[in-house]
Amino acid sequence: MAVPSLNTIAFPTTMASRGTYMFSTQQAGQVNGMGEAILAGSQSVLWSWTALTSTEVAWIATTLLAGETSLTLTAAELWTDTFAEQAFTSGVVYRPIFGVRKAGLFWDVQLEIRHLLPLILS
């Protein structure tokens, strides 16, 4: 499986190979004229790590987010809830949050990617 990428920036393998990766799918929130459930809303990812080094947190803040509080995505390759690779055409990555910085590490780090819309091929 390829390493996830956001706006063609690949995640470092040291980060991509660990942590807890939770992909949330669209929910059946509406029904069509025939009474069948249809999907509504966008998809999201919550990626959590027990601890990241200062170098890894700096990579997110400077390389990925370029010092901004969020990044609007125009392209993304991510894993789905079935661990399949999927392309997305839009979304937003938010600055990570963490619990505490101790012993040179950032603990309980969470990176959120929301408003993901999949690439639809015609």
Image: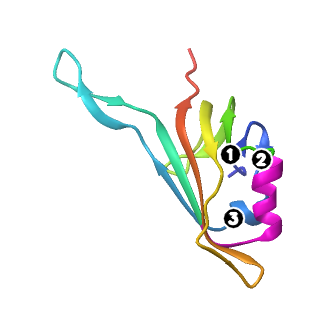
The residue located at (19%, 14%) in the rendering is 33
Q: Give the mark, 2 or 3, whose residue is nearer the N terminus.
A: 3
Majority SS type along the magenta span: helix
- Residues at badges 2 and 3 in contact (C-beta under 8 Å)? no
Mark-to-mark CA distance, 1 and 2: 11 Å
- Please give the residue where the numbered disc 1 appears in the rendered image: 69
Q: What is the crowding at mark 1: few (fewer than 14 residues within 10 Å), some, or many (at least 20)? A: few
The answer to which of 110 and 42 lies nearer the viewer is 110
Inspect the image, locate mark 3, and give the three-letter code of the amino acid beneath it.
Answer: Ser
> Would you identify the image quadrant in which residue 49 lies?
bottom right
- Please give the residue where the numbered disc 3 appears in the rendered image: 17
Closer to us: mark 2 or mark 3?
A: 2
Inspect the image, locate mark 2, and give the three-letter code of the amino acid beneath it.
Answer: Leu
The residue located at (36%, 30%) in the rendering is 40
The residue located at (47%, 39%) in the rendering is 43
Inspect the image, locate mark 1, and give the three-letter code of the amino acid beneath it.
Answer: Thr
Residues shaded magenta: 49-63
Membership of 40 in magenta stretch: no
Taking 2 as reference, is 38 left or right? left
The residue located at (50%, 44%) in the rendering is 44
Q: What is the crowding at mark 3: few (fewer than 14 residues within 10 Å), some, or many (at least 20)? A: few
